[in-house]
Image: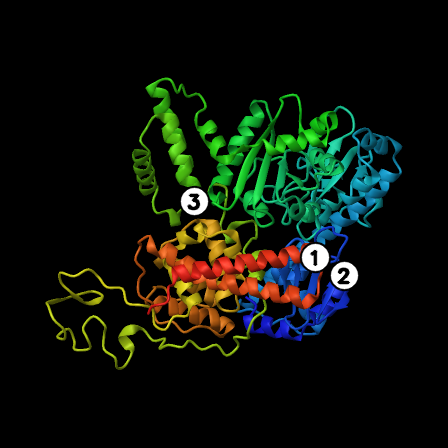
Amino acid sequence: MIPSSFIQDLLARTDIVDLVGRHVTLKKAGINYKGLCPFHGEKSPSFIVSPSRQTYHCFGCGVHGNAVGFLMEHAGLGFVEAVKDLAQMQGMPVPEDDARPEDREKAKQQKEKQQSLTDVMGKATQHWRQQLKASPRAVSYLKGRGLTGEIAARFALGYAPDGWRGLASVFPRYDDPLLVESGLVIVPEDQNVADAAEARRYDRFRDRIMFPIRSVQGEVIGFGGRVLDKGEPKYLNSPETPVFIKGRELYGLYEARTALRNKGYVLVTEGYMDVVALAQWGFANAVATLGTACTADHVHKMFRFTEQVVFSFDGDAAGRRAAGRALEASLPHATDTRRISFLFLPAEHDPDSYIREHGPEAFEACVKQAVPLSRQLILHAAQDCDLESAEGRVRLLAQAIPLLAQLPEGGLRDQIVDELATHARASADDLRRRLAQHGQDDGPRGARRPAGTASHAAQGQGDAPPGPDESDYASYAGGGSSYDDYQPPYDSRPRGQRSGGGDWRSGGQGGKGGKGRWRRDGNGWERQGRPAMRPPPQAARPLERAAWLLSHRSDLWEQLPAEMHDLLCDQPVPLGPFFSWLDRLVADQGPVNATELLAQLRIQAHGSGDTPSAPDAPWSPPAADDALAALAQRLENFHDVGEGQETAEELIALIRPLQLQALNDELDLLLQSGELSEAAETRKVDLVRRANALKLEISRLRPISG
């Protein structure tokens, strides 16, 4: 774990105008700088860089952040890579984490191995691109599919000639083990050869159009090859390697990043040619699974880039089965603020053939008519069910309840329950009771992991310690104050070890104070005959109280809109990192009970250090992340939150002032920029309108007492 104090120091030493200016032509505009946004196409500059705030903001597409966020968005880097690159620019060594020396050495070797594999595949990509230019037959094939040279270059398409050892002329050693490990060369296993260098070997890809598969960072991690003429298999993929796991990667995601912002949704197809052909016709937001069914990891990765997913399948039986698997993978991620739909083309068409025959307008119309997840779930559950008979309706419920149980709790789930009850001619309340019983039979929701997902430690990373993913950067995207010397404004000792003040339950008199009878249990003294009392948190700030509520009611996180997620994750240390961690936790595991959540937070705060074995064991926060550790202990010392409905409203009330401040900050930035375009004036009016509406709502939620 990189210490948060180091990141704050790094951001303080970085001039964001200089960093952004290396990639964007900036001009002085008042106290800020202005240029064309690098994240979406525009003719009039709406991209503002503020040297005073050390942030950037685009009033066209809404993208914003700081220096780390810019490197991640523009260069496609992960959080750790972006921090290390920025540190290298500033000449600052990145502090080592708390991992053991042997673990660091193992992680270093693994990274070097991964880099070697991507270098080998990058070299093969360049070779095959040159071979494409030299092959009139391959060029003619691509032109026949309607592809231009521009699209071929964008996706780095190539051609592997029809030869058994074509790569022997590319690499100095054709017997290099990296060629076999990367999947470029095959060595038959049925050879009785003692020396591996003398074993017979040959190229895996021959006489095929080559589709390089790139990671979100742009590195080539695998290949797909398609035959030019008739042959089997029609598509041939790279085997899985240390850098390529089919169930987690999506073809075309790297190339589609900008289009995802412009289009607002991702279009999931089944083949490489579909992705390339759709890009040729203006649908550059298409991606494809790699010869496997859509997995929960695929869905999770897509929702890091957009809030809307459209799955496109053939209308035949195979397409329907694939849609069923995609539906089940999507259910745990279907929150109220996300939209998932399913597009079924005629059985004789795939996206490539349909758009070439009917044109992009007709295909766009099909996308708009895609079946929403709510309807697809019922259709999927109703397969082989005769709804005119009681047996068929009962079977519908039996097949639908396990699907409904995977949905996060919220408005969408409630709506589907009501609609399903109508189809099954059943009581919605009875259906909810059966759904709750199903959840109890399967164990607590927080202990379940969506099908197809794996823990961080098991996702193909060997024994290397897990590092933060791209979502970690959100906690630093808004800059903020330094928390190097963060100290909790409270007595951090366990409640029973504090001096003075007594105990709120006994009035400080050892259970003899106050009126009425008292009884003692394992947690202290309680007054008999009265409901348990919940005192307010100790001098909790609004954001700390929001963290407190969410730590005890993590199900509320999924009820918040995406803009509130972004706002909370953008807060300074330590609360921003906490909300980012909570976002990943709920996405991976679903809502978690308070005891388990706080235990995992303690482990997160410790990083790779030693953690106590029991929740109530003595705990001394390590120096690696004092701020997050102090926050974790503060949350543990708060009293329990009741599970009434009022906590959701209370959480919204705590976040509204932050939204108001964000609107005012954006309005100030827009006024300072001196932008006078029609779009800027419209945005100003909209910001003022929204700010006034929020003020009224805040007044309603927290009225001023007389």
User: Label 2: which residue?
Assistant: 23
From the viewer's side, name the closer residue of 538 and 74. 538
Q: Position of residue 422 (x, y in %)?
A: 37, 28
Residue projecting furthest to the bottom? 500
Number of numbered tags placed on the structure image:
3
x, y percent for residue 447: 39, 49
Q: Position of residue 224 (x, y in %)?
A: 71, 38
Q: Residue at x 62, y 45 (%)?
A: 264
Q: What sort of colour scheme is used for the picture?
A: rainbow
Mark 3 or 2 closer to N-term? 2
Whether residue 444 is visible to the viewer of this picture, yes or no, is yes
The residue at 33%/52% (across/down) is 645
Quadrant location, the N terminus: bottom right
The residue wearing badge 3 is 408
Secondary structure of the residue carrying tag 2 is loop
Quadrant position of residue 62? bottom right
As drawn, 170 above or below 22: above
Query: Can residue 464 be seen here?
Result: no
Q: Position of residue 13 (x, y in %)?
A: 66, 75
Disc 3 to disc 2, how far (Cα)?
Answer: 41 Å
- Looking at numbered disc 2 in the image, what kind of residue is underneath it? His
Q: Amino acid at mark 3?
A: Pro
Judged from the image, the secondary structure of the residue bearing numbered disc 1 is helix
Left or right placement of residue 65 versus residue 560 in this view: right
Could you tell me how far apart the alpha carbons at marks 1 and 3 are, in whole angstroms?
A: 32 Å
Neighbours of disc 1 within 10 Å: few (<14), some (14-19), many (20+): some
